Image (cartoon, rainbow, N blue to C red):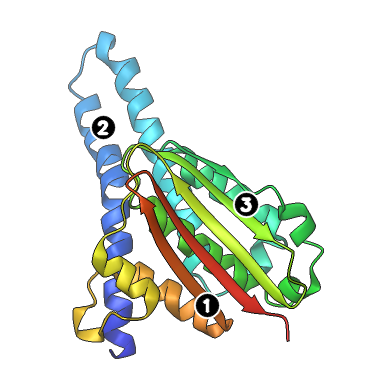
Amino acid sequence: MDALTFSQMLCSRLCHDLITPIGAVSSGFEILEACDDAERENLIDLTRRSAETASRRLTFYRAAFGYSLASQYSSLTSIKQLMESFLRSVKIHFEWPSVHTMDQNKELDKDLASWGRLFMNIVLSGAEGMPYGGEIQIIEDDSDSQNLDFKICFKGDLVTIRPDVMMAFKGQLQPHAYTPYTIQAVLVRMLAEQLRVDLLPDQISNQEFQLQAIGSLS
């Protein structure tokens, strides 16, 4: 697939995610002009929350897809805080217990922007399959001193990854089958290959999905 088509699909995917909260803000202001005082307070609160959701998504997308991540977020800890804020609006609790320790890892520090984008896009892709919310956790396995080994776990009442998205994670989806829905997972695969990271996705049950990311230190 050429770069132009890839960019168009990615833009379509982002616009799809932003149109709902931004549309709600626009509709809220239109209705506000005609509503009575009893409805006004609730409508203002709904419009405010929609604006906050749009703002959080834009901030997250700028970091996940933008060019200059390192200039805005100087550590994995700051990236964790960004992901927490983004996921809160979709009722997903996010944990990253080892993030402070990982910030001391020079192997990660030299490629902070690339690792940050990889983690953010993995989390975003998995969250798409959690319609009822749940929990996402990034776990580091530091037992192997020769490799960087992370497991991103997605748990909830319903956690399912579409077959075509799973194929994209594995690098098995052919370019002619790319769609705006799968392009996020394709980007995850591209970011992983850039860092020479192997991705091992596993749909454990309809309540849990895991994606292991393994990179060599050599």
116 lies above or below 132: below
Comes first in the chain, label 3 or label 2:
2
Q: Residue at x 74, y 65 (%)?
A: 143
Q: Is residue 85 visible?
A: yes
Q: Quadrant of residue 76?
A: bottom right
Q: Nearer the viewer, residue 127 or 216?
A: 216
**Where is residue 68 shown, x and y percent of the image?**
59, 72
Q: Which residue is mark 2?
A: 28
**Real-space Cα separation, disc 3 to disc 2, in angstroms:** 32 Å
Q: Which residue is mark 3?
A: 80
**With 174 as the anchor, is 60 left or right in this view?**
right
199 lies above or below 176: above
Foreground disc of the pair 3, 1: 1
Q: Residues within 10 Å of mark 2 (few under 14, many from 20)?
A: some
Which residue type carries mark 1?
Answer: Asp
Q: Secondary structure at mark 2?
A: helix
Q: Residues within 10 Å of mark 3 (few under 14, many from 20)?
A: many
Q: Which residue is mark 1?
A: 198
**Where is residue 130 shown, x and y percent of the image?**
35, 45
**With 84 as the anchor, is 23 left or right in this view?**
left
